[in-house]
Amino acid sequence: MPQTLSEPCHSELIIKKSRFIGCVQPVSDRAAAVAVVNELRGAHPGAAHVCWALMAGGQSAAVDDGEPGGTAGRPMLDVLRHQDLEGVLATVVRYYGGVKLGAGGLVRAYTDAVAQALLGATRQPLVRMAAFACEVPYAFEGVVRRLLDDAGATLDGVAHGESVRMSISLGAEALVQLKAAVTESTQGRVLWLPDDDGASTD
């Protein structure tokens, strides 16, 4: 099962006078990753390179940022892939020390910076989230809210019309059990809306 990280974790390597500052952290998507990279550029104006790799499904990326092609971003991405990580950004800030490392040396340096950061990282299962909605009579609103809370579901929105419509997100593994509990507690007077099987990964 793919895993993500619970919080950022850092590393620092000095290789032939070059300083490599690595970080691995959870991110939700490419936009969030780019924002982190831009912050790093601002925090390290004297750095020669800010290379990064993102493992996030169809939004994955590998950026060499001026290093020779394939010597930074791709090796960093390979580390994340081999560790079966998802929703994770790896960054390495390099301060050039005046000694060229060569292509092989660069690959090893960027790989090691990410691998070292991962050694101290706390991993957690990647929860596949299901987004769905239901409608219940007003008399059952309180009961359903309690069931959602007990299941650890997130109530994303509530609309009051002829009945109460609730937009909900919950880990997909717990969805079947929650639906059964709500159906039983409302004596079958719950309407599961057509989009209740939509799913996304967090």
Image (cartoon, grey):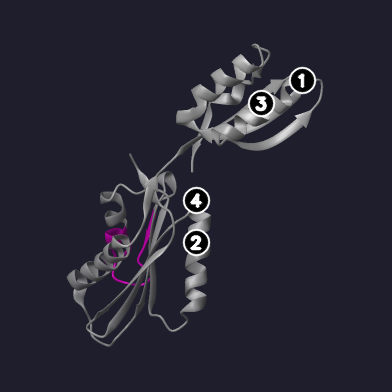
Q: Is residue 144 left or right of residue 122?
A: right
Q: Which residue is mark 1?
A: 139
Labels 4 and 2: the sequence-earlier one: 4
| Amino acid residing under circle 2 | Val
Labels 2 and 3: the sequence-earlier one: 2
Highlighted range, magenta: 61-76
Residue 75: within the magenta?
Answer: yes
Q: Residue at x 40, y 44 (%)?
A: 57
Q: Position of residue 22 (x, y in %)?
A: 35, 69
Q: Residue at x 44, y 49 (%)?
A: 59
The N terminus appears in which quarter of the rendering?
Answer: top left
Answer yes or no: is residue 130 visible: no
The 10 Å Cα crowd at callout 2, few under 14, some 14 to 19, many 20 or more, is some
Labels 2 and 1: the sequence-earlier one: 2
Who is closer to the viewer here, 147 or 103? Answer: 147
- Give the distance between the C-alpha atoms of the residues marked 4 and 1, in whole angstroms: 37 Å
| Amino acid residing under circle 1 | Ala
Q: Which mark is residue 144?
A: 3
Answer yes or no: is residue 164 visible: yes
Q: Is residue 169 above or below residue 100?
A: above
SS category of the residue bearing label 1: helix
| Amino acid residing under circle 3 | Val
Give yes or no for contact between labels 4 and 2 (Cβ–Cβ under 8 Å): no
